[in-house]
Image: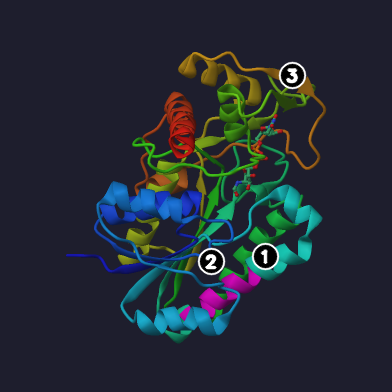
Amino acid sequence: MIPGKILVTGGCGYIGGHTIVDLVNNGFEVISVDDLSRGSLRMLAGVEQILGKEIKNYKVDLTNLDDTQAIFIENPDIVGVVHFAAFKSVNESVQEPLKYYRNNINSLVNILQCAKDYAVPNIVFSSSCSVYGNAKSLPVDESSPLAIAESPYAYTKQIGEVICQDFVKQNPGFNISLLRYFNPVGAHPSVLIGELQEKPENLVPVITQTAIGKRAEMTVFGNDYDTRDGSCVRDYIHVMDIANAHTKALQYLIANKNQQACEVFNLGSGNGVTVLELIQSFESVSGRKLNYTMGDRRAGDVIAVYADNSKACKLLGWNIQYALAQMMDTAWRWELKLQIDEQMQLN
Ligand code: WQD
């Protein structure tokens, strides 16, 4: 029995696209809404190639309530929403805070308004480990105290969680899972989809672009932190594991297994890895020596954060499939695929 139609917002983005693959592979019917301001139709084409079926995308700005409502009116059989659509650059959010507050908060408010008006009871919200800031003790679990947000981006995730919690208090019968991602990396094993960023700021795409020669070199932002090798510690998690956690969360909500109306889950591997350790893993997997230099710390970086993921594993039945080497392997093979595609376009 098909478990029902799911609306994925931001479905043409990195995590959204990978999640559509996992949802469809688990029997869900999926439609996407993405205004393509950050997402791309190339992602959607890759998703359709993997699935061998068409996925409808509504090119709609979710900050426009009328246009958002029209999607729900046209699709009265939507049983759940996975809400990814948001701007996510920490740096950019510092430069343009109003753009981030308007987009990330107004789109969430409109999605919740539509869920209420069109009786869609199951919602999964894309949150972030950035809500923890520089945690006093590690690993962080869902009851760890939240920090003062280090950026407007992180603050929109904290405010988003509060909006979801207030929404379920006033609207019994609605159930929300708040999923706090750690550092999603890698690509679908087919490398038909992956992270598409021209000028990435995140570590793994910077590494693969440096290794393939798109960038001359990369900088490790700080090696004087109080960590085992002086570089920052993060919890890297394969994007397909993140995707499957969304499927598990929807199945959990649709089956009414949730213990509270609004629950938080950490989506991390549970392993803290330093920047230098990740570079070593990449070099051994790719066989490429990376051209990097040690540089100054980056403003806003937390020193170390990694997850206690036992709640998601236990309650959602989430089983992590990909190890660090596979994250590096798929990220590298995706970069190689991009290079081949670019060369074919030139010929
Ligand atoms: C990781 C480490 C950098 C680039 C990300 C997302 C954020 C949130 C959490 C989802 C840091 C170092 C990086 C470089 C480097 N995810 N680095 N040289 O900052 O943990 O945040 O995950 O919501 O949205 O941005 O990830 O990949 O930028 O940095 O040394 O050229 O790599 O200092 O220690 P971050 P990142």
* Quarter of the image with the C terminus in it: top left
On residue 159, the disc is 1
Q: Image check: 150 left or right of 305?
A: right
Do callouts 3 and 1 mark residues in contact (Cβ within 8 Å)? no
Work out whether residue 244 or residue 65 is closer to the camera in this orientation and state it. 65
Instruction: Tell me what residue is drawn at x 74 percent, y 39 percent.
Output: 301
Instruction: Tell me what residue is drawn at x 46 percent, y 47 percent.
Output: 311
- Mark 3, residue position: 293
Work out whether residue 141 or residue 181 is closer to the camera in this orientation and state it. 181
Q: Amino acid at mark 1?
A: Ile
Q: Residues within 10 Å of mark 3 (few under 14, many from 20)?
A: few
Q: Amino acid at mark 2?
A: Asp
Q: CA distance from mark 1 to mark 2?
A: 23 Å
Q: Amino acid at mark 3?
A: Thr
Q: Earlier in the sequence, mark 2 or mark 3?
A: 2
Figure quadrant of residue 256: bottom left
Task: Check the image and report above or below for 212 versus 240.
Answer: above
Work out whether residue 326 or residue 213 is closer to the camera in this orientation and state it. 213
Mark closer to the observer (3, 1): 3
Q: CA distance from mark 3 to mark 1?
A: 37 Å
Mark closer to the observer (1, 2): 2
- Mark 2, residue position: 35
